């Protein structure tokens, strides 16, 4: 794991990573890989695949956003997730301050989301986007249900912006702090949410330079939590780690080979559920771009190593 984790020292290196993210590296979109013959790049000395666990029915997820059963009043947790944030903010803050880590997690996630909405989804930008999509999809195939869906999406986003505007940027700005508090209780979901939101407020050079020590502390903590969750066999953490190594979240300098190796390991984990694990293990990841066969062999080898070390014995359908 350590050899495939990009280590970034504090100070100037942190500035470099964050400024690179501001420059657009974290929003890169890759072209789809070309089709290759089944035997292209096949590893002639492929190690025998570890046995995939037997398939079984998935566990039923338990999310806070699920509706309450018919005729039953929604639980407090459901209200905290579902009601407009300004309506439940004070109750959430009171509960979180009193040590309710579930409340701290919900408050952190919803506050951080509001901070993003206020920065990104102004009514003017939403209406402009709606008009662009209306023009893009206009034509014989633009059915009434499609138009109604676009209108519904616009209204929902406008309503969310209005709720967040009522809350205000100042109250929304503490989202990462609440997620850190919840994460320190050991809750994996809170730690992963902290990973995605820890450095959002340092989206400008001025904000970063003004608070470089706190940004460095958060980056270090987010990396520690993410790496530990990957080592513990957390599948969602592996997904986030692939993105982080590809430049998202401003946690690491971009390392494409490492990201590819972890992406292959993630594909192996997921392939157990659809029955093509043995084939994916034997053939390796799909090869594309300008990398040499030796480079692809290295990526394949390390992806298998990551899978064997951290995910071979994890549940087929992890709890959510």
Image (cartoon, rainbow, N blue to C red):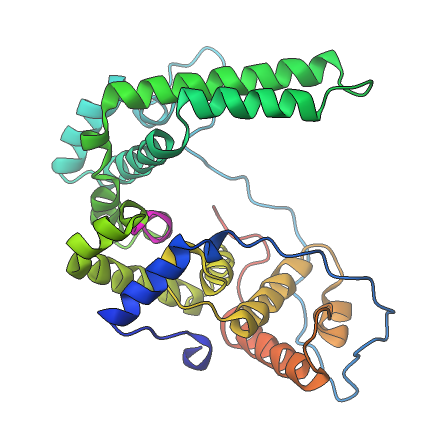
Image side of residue 137 versus residue 132, left or right: right
Q: Is residue 248 magenta?
A: no
Towards the viewer: 166 or 52: 166
Q: In the image, residue 59 lies at what x, y percent?
A: 56, 44
Towards the viewer: 152 or 109: 152
Q: In the image, residue 86 lies at what x, y percent?
A: 26, 19
Image side of residue 303 versus residue 228, left or right: right
Image side of residue 275 versus residue 114, left or right: right
Q: Residue at x 38, y 14 (%)?
A: 73
Q: Residue at x 49, y 71 (%)?
A: 255
Residue at the extreme left: 98
- In this rendering, the answer to whether 43 lies above or below 104 is below
- In this rendering, the answer to whether 250 lies above or below 11 is above
Q: Is residue 194 magenta?
A: yes
Quadrant location of the N terminus? bottom left
Task: Report whether residue 186 is seen.
Answer: yes
- In this rendering, the answer to whether 109 lies above or below 55 is above
Towards the viewer: 169 or 235: 169
Range drawn in magenta: 192-199
Q: In the image, residue 225 lies at what x, y percent?
A: 32, 62
Q: Quadrant of residue 250?
A: bottom left
Image side of residue 18 versus residue 157, left or right: left
Numbered disc total: 0
């Amino acid at each position: 794991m350590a050899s495939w984790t990009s280590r970034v020292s504090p100070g100037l290196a942190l500035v470099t990573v964050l400024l690179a993210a501001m420059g657009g590296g974290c929003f890169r979109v890759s072209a789809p890989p070309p089709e290759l013959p089944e035997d292209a790049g096949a590893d002639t000395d492929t190690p025998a695949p570890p046995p995939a666990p037997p398939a079984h029915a998935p566990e039923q997820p338990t999310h806070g956003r699920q509706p309450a059963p018919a005729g039953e009043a929604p639980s407090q947790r459901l209200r905290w997730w579902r009601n407009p944030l300004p309506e439940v903010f004070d109750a959430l803050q009171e509960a979180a301050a009193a040590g309710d880590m579930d409340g701290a997690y919900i408050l952190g996630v919803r506050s951080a989301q509001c901070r993003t909405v206020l920065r990104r989804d102004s009514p003017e930008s939403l209406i402009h986007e709606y008009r662009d999509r209306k023009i893009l999809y206009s034509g014989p195939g633009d059915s009434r249900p499609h138009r109604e869906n676009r209108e519904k999406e616009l209204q929902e986003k406008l309503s969310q912006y209005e709720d967040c505007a009522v809350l205000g940027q100042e109250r929304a700005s503490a989202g990462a702090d609440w997620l850190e508090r919840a994460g320190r209780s050991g809750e994996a979901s809170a730690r992963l949410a902290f990973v995605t939101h820890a450095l959002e407020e340092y989206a400008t050079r001025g904000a970063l330079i003004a608070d470089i020590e706190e940004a460095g502390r958060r980056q270090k903590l987010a990396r520690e939590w993410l790496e530990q969750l990957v080592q513990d066999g957390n599948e969602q953490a592996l997904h986030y780690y692939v993105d982080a190594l590809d430049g998202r979240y401003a946690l690491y300098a971009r390392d494409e080979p490492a990201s590819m190796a972890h992406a292959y390991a993630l594909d192996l984990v997921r392939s157990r559920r659809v029955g093509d694990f043995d084939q994916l293990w034997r053939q390796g990841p799909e090869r594309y771009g300008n990398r040499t066969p030796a480079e692809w062999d290295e990526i394949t080898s390390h992806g298998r190593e990551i899978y064997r070390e951290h995910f071979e014995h994890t549940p087929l359908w992890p709890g959510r």
